[in-house]
Amino acid sequence: MSSVSTAALAASPEARATDPARLVTFTLRTDADPGVLPRVLELVAKRGLVPELLTSRRHPDSETLSIEMEVAGMVRHESDHVANCLRAIPLVMQVLATERSLA
């Protein structure tokens, strides 16, 4: 009998469903705080993914930060979940998730 639990296997990046032809763009408006970027990246990194693109721009007149992050390979329910998790970060004011096909 295996000592690896079903929950641990389901959480591993190798076991997650993928859609290699799908690119999701997350566009965020946040407070200009140094803790925002690591929190945003954590939601992608813990799924074993690396963003295709990550840009941020600080807007000094409003003390806000605009972030754009493109991630390939996420299935719809996973990107919806990540978008909801991004919205739950206290410093995040707005999240928009859009998708396009890479095929």
Image: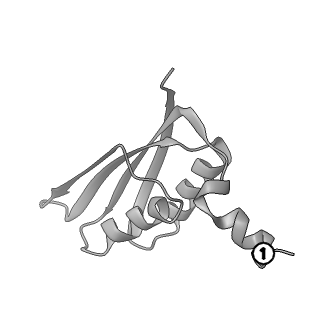
Residue 24 as seen in the image, left or right of residue 66: right
**Front-lying residue, 1 or 22:** 1
- Compared with 89, 61 (above or below) is above
Residue hosting label 1: 5
Residue 53 as seen in the image, left or right of residue 8: left
Report the residue at 65% width, 53% height from top. 16
Report the residue at 50% width, 62% height from top. 87
Indicate the amino acid at tag 1. Ser
Is the N terminus in the top left, top right, bottom left or bottom right quadrant?
Answer: bottom right
Q: Position of residue 48 (x, y in %)?
A: 50, 58
Which quarter of the figure has residue 64? bottom left
Which quarter of the figure has residue 5? bottom right
**Front-lying residue, 53 or 3:** 3
Report the residue at 19% width, 61% height from top. 62
Residue 95 as seen in the image, left or right of residue 34: right
Residue, far left:
60
Report the residue at 38% width, 53% height from top. 28
- Compared with 47, 51 (above or below) is above
Residue 4 as seen in the image, left or right of residue 20: right
User: Callout 1: few (<14), some (14-19), or many (20+) C-alpha neighbours within 10 Å?
Assistant: few
Q: Position of residue 70 (x, y in %)?
A: 39, 43
Q: How many marks?
A: 1
Q: Position of residue 21 (x, y in %)?
A: 54, 29
Residue, far front:
1
**Front-lying residue, 43 or 48:** 48
Residue, far bottom:
3
- Compared with 77, 41 (above or below) is below
- Compared with 74, 37 (above or below) is below
Q: Secondary structure at mark 1?
A: loop
Q: Position of residue 10 (x, y in %)?
A: 72, 63
